[in-house]
Amino acid sequence: MEARVQTRVSAYAIAVEEDRLLLTRLSEASPIFDPGLWHLPGGGIDHGEQPVEALARELREETGLKLVAARLVDARTYAVQRHGVRWHLTALFYAVDLKAHAPAVVEIDGSTDAADWIPLAELRDSMLSPAASDALRMLRSGAPRPGDCV
């Protein structure tokens, strides 16, 4: 049986605080990337929703954190197959400023089962989704960081 093709546009947050990157761990409900990987907070843009609105909503659901400011810094595409679906994902990356406190997953039974600030020095590609790996490379190459967006 041929895999069906699905297209999705998503908005993702690149949030850095004290040399730590805000990440979410993917649960079994993750439709695109493998469970257990650490991923950027964010997700699919709903019909009629603006990208920054989606970003703010996803940040609330996945981390409990409030978006203060966002600046588009990059866009990438990914081709992934999971659960018989061939995904074509367009990812919009935003450097963000957040109203900081300890992150906590708010959405029950969603695609995220944990959220945490993880030291940049401890991050390895093998523990990250492709999008989070790309964000880490952007940060290490001097791409705009949170705080640069206002």
Image (cartoon, rainbow, N blue to C red):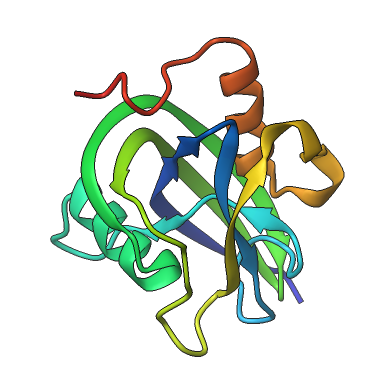
* The C terminus lies in quadrant: top left
Q: Relative to the observer, which residue lies in front, 85 or 145? A: 145
x then y, percent, for residue 41: 47, 55
Residue 19: image quadrant is top right
Residue 68 lies, with reference to residue 53, above or below; the image says: above
Q: Residue furthest bottom?
A: 109
Q: Is residue 101 left or right of residue 80?
A: left
**What quarter of the picture does the N terminus occupy?**
bottom right
What residue do we see at 69% from left, 42% from top?
Answer: 130
Residue that extends furthest to the right in the rendered view of this protein: 126
Percent position of residue 18, x then y: 53, 33
| x and y, in percent, of residue 56 in the image | 25, 56
Please report the residue visible at 36 percent of the width from the left and 35 percent of the height from the top. 94
Give the left or right position of residue 63, taking residue 67 as reference.
right
130 up-or-down from 105: above or below: above
| Closer to the camera in the image, 77 or 72 | 72
Q: In the displayed structure, would residue 5 be above or below residue 70? A: below
Left or right position of 45 against 128: left
Residue at (58%, 53%) from the top-left corner?
23
Q: Measuring 41% from the left and 44% from the top, which residue is drawn there? A: 13
Residue 97 in the image: x percent, y percent?
A: 30, 38
Residue pushed farthest top? 142
